[in-house]
Amino acid sequence: MKKPMVALIVVILLAAGVGAYFLLGSSYKQKSPEVKLPSEQTNVPKEKNTISIKDFVFNPDTLTVKVGDIVTWRNDDGVVHSIKSTDFSSPNIKNGDTFKFQFVKAGTYEYNCGIHPYMKGKVVVE
């Protein structure tokens, strides 16, 4: 008589454990962190004098700064770009990388992407 009672208790405990696992287990499972490429991040902090490269466009396409300011180009695109001007140029800029240039003279500086020449932008230095 003792063995059937022990077996019944074991079965009840196992059933309760399996039920608790399925009911509560999903809330205790550790989720994998969501990883996003820099170009997919929506809450990237906006730096002063930063030009974003995304979807084959410079944004903003015209930026006005003061003499001595540093302008940063940030590649938020999934492909490599570069900055080409008669006054300055960058190496290839991969996704998530930046290029910085300090403007020391007033003027209008037109530039384009050295890889995709149809991409155009302008920095106005006052």
Image (tube, grey):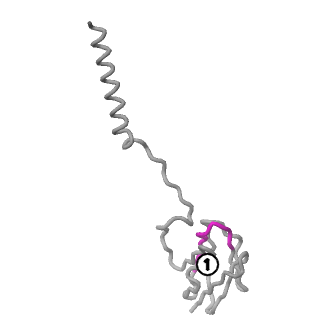
Give yes or no for residue 74 being in the magenta stretch. yes
Q: Secondary structure at mark 1?
A: strand
Q: Indicate left or right for 29 with 47 as reference.
A: left
Q: Residues within 10 Å of mark 1 (few under 14, many from 20)?
A: some
Q: Can you say whether 40 is above or below 86 in the image?
A: above
Q: Can you say whether 11 is above or below 40 in the image?
A: above
Q: Indicate left or right for 8 with 57 as reference.
A: left
Give yes or no for residue 97 being in the magenta stretch. no
Residue 81 position by quadrant:
bottom right
Q: Residue 45, position in %: x, y?
A: 48, 70
Q: Residue 16, position in %: x, y?
A: 31, 28
> The C terminus is located in which quarter?
bottom right
Q: Residue 1, position in %: x, y?
A: 26, 6
Per the rendered image, the range of residues in magenta is: 70-81
Residue located 70% across and 70% down the image:
92
Residue located 63% across and 93% down the image:
107
Q: Can you say whether 30 is above or below 44 in the image?
A: above
Q: On the image, numbered disc 1 is attached to which residue? A: 57
Q: Nearer the viewer, residue 121 or 97?
A: 121
Q: Indicate left or right for 29 with 16 as reference.
A: right
Residue located 60% across and 79% down the image:
58
Q: Total of numbered circles in the picture?
A: 1
The three-letter code of the residue at mark 1 reads Val
Q: Can you say whether 126 is above or below 46 in the image?
A: below
Residue 52 position by quadrant:
bottom right
Residue located 57% across and 78% down the image:
51
Q: Nearer the viewer, residue 39 or 91?
A: 39
Q: Residue 74, position in %: x, y?
A: 59, 72
